[in-house]
Image (cartoon, rainbow, N blue to C red):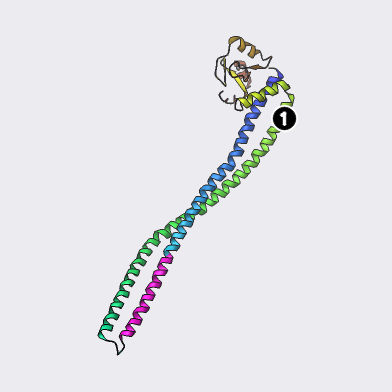
Amino acid sequence: MVPDLQLVVQLHHLDHRIDALRREIASLPKHIAEIAKALEAHTRKVEADRAALAANQRDRKQLEADIQVQEQRIAKLKDQMSGSKVTNEQYAAFKREIEFCETAIRKHEDRILDRMSESEPLEQNLKTAEAALHQEKQVVEAEKQRARERTALDQKSLEELLKQRQQVVAGITPEVCLAYERIRKKRKGVAVAEAIDGRCSACHLALRLQFFQDLRRGDQVMFCESCRRIMYYIPPIEVEDLGSGSVSEPRPLEAGP
């Protein structure tokens, strides 16, 4: 295999790893944003539960205050009824007013009982939601820390790969390098394809016999006649190679045309 082709294949594998790292680095903030958004929604739910419980408690206090007002009014009316100059008509009016206040008190007491029965599930829901929110906050913080650590490692690996890429690019003939970059831009980042079983591993079309024979010699940089990607060929492993313990690296997956 000519040096240019060897370097282009090496560059192809480097770019595959570089692109994967860049995607992961870009995905981590999105992942954090998603879990932070979920946490924010749960926080708002807990705040709504707190507000509902607080409103329930305010209603109870207001009803208790209204009962106290009615009781004070009843006491005042009874004092007025006990006066010596009260006529029968006034006595009857006071009595009707007292009955009206007592009816209001019973209604308020019924409403207080309703609020009390409502407060029990509200308190339980709030307690459960607060515990879940506390646990979720810990999970989110741990996830953020892992993301920060992962990003730092990815950035370090990316810098090392970019340095390696510069060294590889420096050794490639400028014309071949330009062709590689042009194809890579046009073919969604995949500029190189391996010939496997007489086919291009990227576009999967069969290669002409003469083209495949020329490609197997590896003495020139060749382009797929269909998708125009730079092609290379790795000879199959012979039985004696397996006996010697030599193992070829696994082929990376290639994207389609």
The magenta region covers 57-82
Reply above or below: 201 against 144: above
Residue type highlighted by circle 1 = Gln
Determine crowd level at label 1: few under 14, some 14-19, many 20+ residues with C-alpha closer than 10 A: few
63 inside magenta stretch: yes
- Measured as percent of width and height from the top left, residue 188 is found at 60, 27
Which residue corresponds to the image point at 60% horizontal and 37% vertical from the top-left? Answer: 24
- Measured as percent of width and height from the top left, residue 17 is found at 63, 31
Residue for badge 1: 166
Reply above or below: 144 against 1: below
Secondary element type, mark 1: helix
Give the quarter of the image for residue 150: top right
Give the quarter of the image for residue 170: top right
- Measured as percent of width and height from the top left, residue 239 is found at 59, 16
In this view, the residue farthest toward the top is 210
Location of the N terminus (image quadrant): top right
Which residue corresponds to the image point at 65% horizontal and 29% vertical from the top-left? Answer: 15
Location of the C terminus (image quadrant): top right
78 inside magenta stretch: yes
79 horizontally vs 152: left or right: left
164 horizontally vs 56: left or right: right
Which residue corresponds to the image point at 49% horizontal and 51% vertical from the top-left? Answer: 42
Which residue corresponds to the image point at 62% horizontal and 32% vertical from the top-left? Answer: 19
Q: Examine the rendering and report whether any part of residue 247 can be seen.
A: no
In this view, the residue farthest toward the left is 88
